[in-house]
Amino acid sequence: MRAKICKTANVYFAVDRLVSGAVSQLQKGLQKIDDLLGKIPGVSFLVSFAQVFVHIALNYVDECCLGYTFLHKDQSAFKSAADGVVIYFQNWKKLLKDAAVMTLAVMVISFLAWLLPFIIFSGLFALLHIHWMFAALLSIMVAVIIKSAFVDSFLMVRMMVSYMEVAPSTEITFDLYAKLCKLSDKFKSLFDKGQQEQQQNGSAQL
């Protein structure tokens, strides 16, 4: 029983690493586009927003795909993860729309998480005749803690909910496998492993 659990854990760890690697490669491709746009005068702010937007949109692909594999235990975890990545990119319009909303929400929450402590600390430090810069630094620390403890977890859950809303009803476009394989050798490795395990399982049943 313990050996089976360890084997299952190793499989999911390998799946997570491959999905993360594939997404990282795809994100680097988008980063090159951002770099080119960033050289155009007057659009640096839009590029910065786009980078945060893309980060939120793609940062939780591996969690979404792992969640998808848990719902499809009847087939290879590698196959389910590859399907999950395809489903994610096939529904890019909805997921990017949700990521855009989340980007604005994160910016507002992060600002408030800094502003409110700053007002409190600056008032307190003024009474103690301590420079306001210490209040600003302390407020930044509080904002980082709040983001790490609450905002990041909320983002992950929200993006997974958005993904799970569309995944069950998505009819996979099979030509997208080939396109993603060309864009990322990590995804190709994930896809190939899924195909190999599927063939081995089919041979075993025969």
Image (spheres, rainbow, N blue to C red):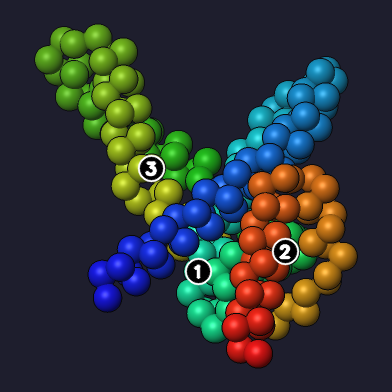
- Packing grade of label 1 (10 A; few <14, some 14-19, many >=20) is some
Q: Which residue carries the number 3 mark?
A: 147
Q: Which residue carries the number 2 mark?
A: 86
- Work out how far the residue at label 3 is from the one at label 1, CA to CA, in angstroms: 23 Å
Q: Earlier in the sequence, mark 3 or mark 1?
A: 1
Q: In the rendered image of this protein, does residue 35 appear above or below residue 205?
A: above
Amino acid type indicated by mark 3: Lys
**Left or right, residue 116 beside residue 17:** left
**Residue 161, image x, y percentages:** 53, 70
Q: Nearer the viewer, mark 3 or mark 2?
A: 2
Amino acid type indicated by mark 1: Gly
Furthest residue toward bottom: 206
**Quadrant (top left, top right, bottom left, bottom right) of the N terminus:** bottom left
Q: Circle 3 — which element?
A: helix
Q: Earlier in the sequence, mark 2 or mark 1?
A: 1
Q: Circle 2 — which element?
A: helix
Q: In the rendered image of this protein, does residue 205 appear above or below residue 28?
A: below
Q: Earlier in the sequence, mark 3 or mark 2?
A: 2
Give the quadrant of residue 199: bottom right
**Residue 5, image x, y percentages:** 32, 69
Q: Which residue carries the number 1 mark?
A: 67
Amino acid type indicated by mark 2: Val
Query: Between 129 and 69, which is closer to the camera in this rendering?
Result: 69
The answer to whether residue 154 of the structure is visible from this angle is: no
Q: Nearer the viewer, mark 3 or mark 1?
A: 1
Q: Are marks 2 and 1 in contact (CB under 8 Å)?
A: no
Q: In the rendered image of this protein, does residue 141 appear above or below residue 66?
A: above
**Left or right, residue 82 beside residue 124:** right
Q: Residue at x 34, y 71 (%)?
A: 4
